[in-house]
Image: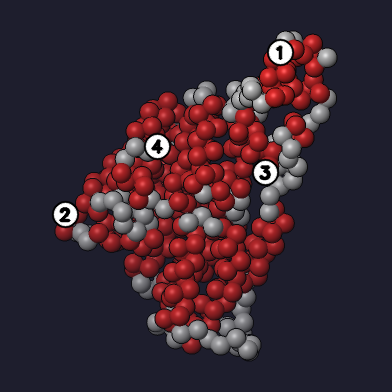
Amino acid sequence: MLADRLGKSKSWVDKVERGVRSLDKVSTLREVATALRIDLAVLLGRHALPVGMAERVEGVERIRAALSSYEIALGRPAGRRPVLSVEALSREVAHLWSTFQHARYPQVIDLAPQLLVDAQRTHANDPEAGRAPLVEAYRVTASLLMKLGVADVAWLAVDRAMIAATGDRLSVAAVAVQLGPVLRGSGRARVATSAMLAAAYSVAPPVIEHGTPPELSLCGTLLVQAALAASCDGDDRTAATLIDEAAGMAARVGEGHDHHRTGFGPTAVELARIAAMVELGDAREAVVRHEEVITRDGWGWLHAEHRAAYLIDAARAYLHADDPVNAGRTLIGADRIAPAEIRHRPAGRDLVARVAREPDAPSTLIDLAATLGAG
């Protein structure tokens, strides 16, 4: 009966049942599910429930509460927890950054609220030495919140960071690295372009050839952020010019560095160029460049978070180029590198759902979509 409903031979059904033949096309899986009169998620043996949704919401609310706390300013008692030394706090902040760059977002969600409270207390106890780790705690928190798709809370973290960094030119510029995505995510691309350029040129060395790698990394990253904002605004000429300028700086910095937590280098700039192309609608050229850039040695030097986040942009390029098969494979690749980038980031989950609806999407992706409850 199943063979008749599918218009297939009984031999075909028998081979599928015995595992001799695999169902590797989403369109075929859907046909089988329809013939059996069951939901596709049931056929795949998955429950269509969002993964970790309740935990993420609760975690964001705890971070929001920590950012909205004014205990120090109001002179309230700090409680029984001892104030961390600047050295101990700096180690905790470095650990949180490392955890974020490995895309372990659930752990960052768990750690961030208490770290913010500790950073505020340490800064109150030693305002001068405690400022740098406080700024970094706000920066990594803002980066996490943008991953989780809560731009309003991320903006609060960035604003706190800017206030703490004021008076230190390099710290302000470092915070601007997080400000760019927050402004873009809030629909203020033109404002983001202007702000990023101002921040970039405030730290640009007078002579590029004499600039230090940390200076060039920070300035170049801000130019990349300005270019991405320009691409969101449809300004392809400005985006290309700024990325070319950043590429010149990246060539001097080289690969494998992470000055100011930027991961800046030639490969990182090329990934940004591709992301800008996708935003501007040049998907086919983006795909060509993508297939070249992931063969570079510099690709492996990038943090897992950076690579997996970029692969979501690359998957968008494939989808826009009418290639859902490679879009799906690219998303599966991102999931292997950094599962949380797909499973905990709304942008990743949404794209999985979009690609899974394509008739030619890989069956492994429809399995992932069912696991995530994305559809």
**Element under label 2?**
helix
The reply to whether callout 3 and callout 2 are in contact (CB within 8 Å) is no
Between label 1 and label 3, give the one nearer the viewer.
Answer: 1
Residue bearing mark 3: 372
- The image quadrant where one finds the N terminus is top right
Side of 73 where 34 appears, left or right: right
* Residue 335 picture location, percent across and down: 54, 44
Q: Which residue is mark 1?
A: 11
Please tell me how crowded label 4 is: few (under 14), some (14-19), or many (20+) other residues with Cα within 10 Å: many
Amino acid beneath label 2 = Glu
Quadrant of the rendered structure where residue 133 is?
bottom left
Q: Earlier in the sequence, mark 2 or mark 4?
A: 2
Distance from disc 1 to disc 2, alpha carbons, whole Å, reads: 70 Å
Disc 2 target residue? 209
The answer for how far apart the CA atoms under marks 3 and 2 are is 49 Å
Proximity of marks 3 and 4: CB atoms separated by less than 8 Å = no
Task: In this rendered view, identify the residue nearer to me: 92 or 250.
Answer: 92
Provide the residue designation for mark 4: 274
